[in-house]
Amino acid sequence: MQANRGRIVVNPSFQEWVYLDEKSPHGLQTPMKRQVTYCVEEEIDRKEFEIKDDPWKQHNYKSKVDFVGAKSNGRCCRAAILMSIIIGSLMSIAALALVLLMLFGKVGAGCGCQSSSEVSPSAVTQRDFLAWIEDLQRNVTNLQQKLGKKTHELKVVHLSLRDLDGKLHNLTKKLNITETALQDKDNKFLVLLQNTTSNFLLKTDLIRYDLNSTRNWLLASDAELKNELEAVNTTLILKLNSTAERLDREDISTITL
């Protein structure tokens, strides 16, 4: 029994079913056997499966296998008892109809019934039903095995994700520490750069002021030196002229004598 996709609910309550006439004389009793409910939501023969929602918020990824007893699963027990009552009622009605036919002579030794060697339709139906039950059991076993494999794979994935989550947490913590250290270094470097820039600007202003002062002093000194040189030249010229005049007068007086 296969399904392409969807929800399969199997309740193998009739794995050990018997006919009413084959039951023990103790009467109908609540079967104290394990009721198995499979709630499977997966795609058969798929190589990969998709998890649309958050996988950790799903209850075992929407795949559940619950094994409970008949006492804790009263609904399944009531369904089994109800099915047994329905089957018994149908068989009782069939037996009553057969008795009535025999009383009215519709069914007897000369009736056109099939020979004992031939298989009756009810036996064929029962055989098909048994074959269907066996096939259903095999499919349920296969589904259970596949579900076990999927559960194991999901556990492995869960452990891997937990390991990755731990590594990611540690890496995030290290990154935060590194970011904090880099931010502190950046702040210190920025403060140092600001102080260096301020000192450089201050020194530049001082150097510019000194250069301007030196230039002004040099200009003033040059002007003063020019004035002094002009005064010295004037004095020398006057002295040279007076000396030349004095020499000329002496020469003239010498010639006169």
Image (cartoon, helix red, strand yellow):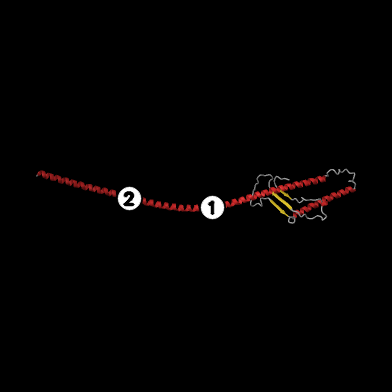
**x and y percentages locating residue 140 in the rendered image:** 72, 48
In the image, 72 versus 119, the foreground residue is 119
- Residue at position x 60%, y 51% in the image: 163
In the image, 53 versus 222, the foreground residue is 53
- Residue at position x 23%, y 48% in the image: 232
In the image, 22 versus 241, the foreground residue is 22
- The residue singled out by tag 2 in the image is 214
- The residue singled out by tag 1 in the image is 174
Foreground tag (2 vs 1): 1
**x and y percentages locating residue 184 in the rendered image:** 49, 54
Question: Is disc 1 placed on a helix, strand or loop?
Answer: helix
Instruction: Measure how far apart labels 2 and 1 are at the Cα level.
Output: 58 Å
Q: Residues within 10 Å of mark 1 (few under 14, many from 20)?
A: few
Q: Is residue 127 left or right of residue 157?
A: right
- Residue at position x 40%, y 53% in the image: 199
Q: Earlier in the sequence, mark 2 or mark 1?
A: 1
Q: The residue under label 2 is which amino acid type?
A: Thr
**x and y percentages locating residue 183 in the rendered image:** 49, 52
Q: Quadrant of the C terminus?
A: top left
Q: The residue under label 1 is which amino acid type?
A: Lys
**x and y percentages locating residue 217 in the rendered image:** 31, 50
- Residue at position x 72%, y 48% in the image: 141
The single residue placed furthest to the bottom in the displayed view is 71
Q: Is residue 44 left or right of residue 246?
A: right
